[in-house]
Image (spheres, rainbow, N blue to C red):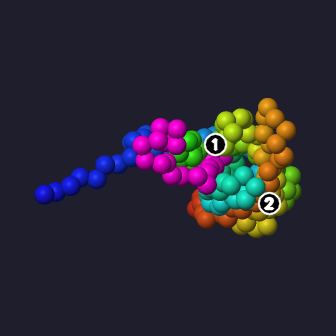
């Protein structure tokens, strides 16, 4: 006799939310880039990285792409909360797990001044308290690597700000067009 294993209630919801988060990062959001043209152009290329906040119990991936000569990049941050498991059959825990599914966050803006970079993430709901979170970041550009710190502030209560670190590395430089042949 064959026995079937039952998946916990809410399993389909959790899977659907995970797929939705992955789809968001497949279609990155536009990110306004501010700064002097040479400073912004220095970031042209494709960048991948990570962030971590032990204070917040979250980590995730960072990706963005900036084409040479543009003032808008395209990218997202994928937030991965630490609590990812629901207790089978408990609807309250299933809802909590659904809140803990990875999700794409939108980078609101990036400002570049020389080798310094700063910016912010659009406000988003905390997977922990349900309040809105406001995240800002700053860092230093050193060649093909950017690294720095982030600060997460809560709305609606006096929770202390949470700190973390982030980095991104250029994985692909923009292609330079081939030289045009000289006319004779």
Region in magenta: 72-95
| Magenta span includes 76 | yes
- For residue 130, say whether it is visible: yes
Along the viewing direction, whichever of 153 and 33 lies nearer the viewer: 153
Q: Which quadrant would residue 130 be assigned to in this image?
A: top right
Q: Is 167 located above or below residue 4 in the figure?
A: below
Q: Residue at x 73, y 66 (%)?
A: 145
Q: Which mark is residue 12?
A: none
In the rendered structure, which disc, 1 or 2, sits on the residue that comes first in sequence?
A: 1
Image location (x, y in percent) of residue 24: 53, 43
Q: Label 2: how many residues lie within 10 Å, few (<14), some (14-19) or many (20+)?
A: some
Q: Residue furthest left?
A: 1
Residue drawn where x is 80% and y is 60% of the image: 148
User: x, y (%) of residue 125?
Assistant: 66, 37
* 141 relative position to 76: left or right: right
Q: Element under label 1?
A: loop
Instruction: Please name the residue that numbered disc 2 is placed on.
Output: 148
Question: x, y (%) of residue 55?
Answer: 76, 55
In-image side of 4 versus 73 (left or right): left
Q: Tell me how far mark 1 sits from mark 2, CA to CA.
A: 24 Å
Residue at 39%, 46% (x, y): give it: 8
- Callout in the foreground (1, 2): 1
The residue identified by callout 1 is 127
Q: Foreground residue, 32 or 151?
A: 151
């Amino acid at each position: 006799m064959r026995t079937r294993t039952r998946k916990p209630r809410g399993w389909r919801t959790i899977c659907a939310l995970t797929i939705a988060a992955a789809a968001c990062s497949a279609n990155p959001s536009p990110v306004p880039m501010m700064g002097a043209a040479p400073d912004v152009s220095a970031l042209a290329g494709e960048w991948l990285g990570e962030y971590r906040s032990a204070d917040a119990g979250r980590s995730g991936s960072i990706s963005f792409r900036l084409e040479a000569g543009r003032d808008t990049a395209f990218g997202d941050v994928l937030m991965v909360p630490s609590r990812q498991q629901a207790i089978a059959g408990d609807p309250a825990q299933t809802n909590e797990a659904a809140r803990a599914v990875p999700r794409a966050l939108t980078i609101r803006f990036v400002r570049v001044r020389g080798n310094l970079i700063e910016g912010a993430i659009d406000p988003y709901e905390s997977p922990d308290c349900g309040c809105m979170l406001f995240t800002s970041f700053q860092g230093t550009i050193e060649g093909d690597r950017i690294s720095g710190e982030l600060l997460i502030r809560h709305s609606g209560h006096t929770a202390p700000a949470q700190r973390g670190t982030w980095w991104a590395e250029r994985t692909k430089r923009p292609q330079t067009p081939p030289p045009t042949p000289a006319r004779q």
